[in-house]
Amino acid sequence: MENIITFASVTHAMKARELLRRHRISANLIRTPAKLRRGSCGYSLVIPRQFAQAAALVRDNRLPYRHMFGDDAP
Amino acid sequence: MMYFDNGATTFPKPPSVVRAVNSALQVYGGNPGRGGHRMAVRAGEVIYRCRENAAALFGAENPENIIFTDSCTTALNIVLHGLLQRGDHVVLSSLEHNAVVRPLHYLVKTRGVRLSVAEVAEGDDEQTLQSFRKAINGDTKLVVCTAASNVFGVRLPIERIAALCRIYGILFCVDAAQGAGVVPLRVAASGIDFLCAAGHKGLYGPMGTGILVINSDTLPAPLTQGGTGSLSRSPEQPNELPDKYESGTPNLPGIAGLNAGIRFVSARGEAHLLRTEIQLLRRLYDGLAQMPEVQLYTQPPAAETHVPVLSFNLRGCDCEEVAALLDRRFAIAVRAGLHCAPAAHRAYGTASTGTVRAVVSAYTNLSQINAFLFAVNKITKLLPKKVAIEEQNVVK
């Protein structure tokens, strides 16, 4: 499975992407894939590398994510 | 045309604003926050950049604390309608625009909200602060006031009023329609709960843009509900910022232009813009003060006490007629009348006459000020004769 963090709104997804950029972690913004939507539309960040670090940054900065999916998701 | 109606909307706009609006319309104009294609994503990025830049300008903690509206008036309505309940007491200043007065008047009639007016003493912050202190009572939920009068340019001691509200545990909302872009206003550092700004005045964006900055855990009920591009299966309006207040497709071209306008202001700095504009306004004030036919209403403008807004009249002349002559004969644009702020006119004794208002912007220069003075001087020679002739005709 791809390493993905899902968000309710594009603002939160972009805020998270900015945070990751500042920590030199690249993330691609996409619409949340159907299998991960869990009853709602929204935006997600695909994080090819350093996912665990990215997930920790999002959590530690209290960004309002919805779900985290990845091999080493917390 | 020499444009002095910058209090209504600034003109011209910086070229970067025009380019940004054009790009949004011609290059990437997808619907931000809705689709996943690259145009929609790019549109969303531009809006997000504007949130970031606005948050930096107004000292907000997070970009999502920036709510885009269609005007400062709508931002004020969100706060006033969304917060005030039956029996609440509100303190407002004596210089408020109808954008504050009319929603409050409506809430007085429909919800029994009670109001007290704090008199502003021009140039005497201590006295102004004392007026606010006296107006506050145990039921006061909100203090709302302008950062600066849109008619007379008089600044209010916003940081000190914010500190007063903190002491009493009262919410504080600032109408920054004339202050934003020239008066440094930082919500988190100052303790301002809600700041409402027009995008098309001192921020140099297009018309149809406004900002509500939220710096409070107390959130007003939203005025509108609808599609936000988020949590779409739920019939409930999202509670998260900014979606809670941003239903419907956002004004992408406007916000793209506003983003460029905010960058224009940030690059120059509000304090610098205020200083240079007040210097020009002071030249105008001093020149007008030398004409005995001109009536001025305020103290000489200074950066500490005023924004670059000046009201005057020609004794015995109708302000609308003066404005019309400035337009027709001298190609000078000003606004005359009550400027949607009858309360401010009552405070300065001009409710029955109105005033001619001249407002300086970053694009005003000294030769325009000199041309303005030349034009007014000419009109002082023209108008009284015309008035005398009309009076003779009436007598006949």
Image (cartoon, rainbow, N blue to C red):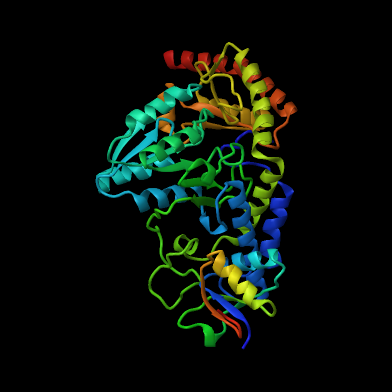
Question: Image point 48% across, 25% down: which residue?
Answer: B125
Is residue B32 shown to the viewer in this render?
Answer: no
Residue B252 placement (x, y as % from top left) = 60, 61
Residue B238 placement (x, y as % from top left) = 43, 67
Residue A27, picture quadrant: bottom right
Q: Quadrant of the N terminus of chain B?
A: top right
Question: Image point 40% across, 68% down: which residue?
Answer: B237
Question: Image point 50% across, 26% down: which residue?
Answer: B355
Q: Is B119 located above or below residue B382 in the figure? A: below
Q: Is residue B206 left or right of residue B188?
A: right
Q: Is residue B42 left or right of residue B71?
A: right
Residue B384 placement (x, y as % from top left) = 55, 15
Is residue B201 shown to the viewer in this render?
Answer: yes
Q: Is A57 located above or below residue B260 in the figure? A: below
Front residue of B57/B50: it is B57
Front residue of B156/B228: it is B156
Q: Is residue A25 left or right of residue B202?
A: right
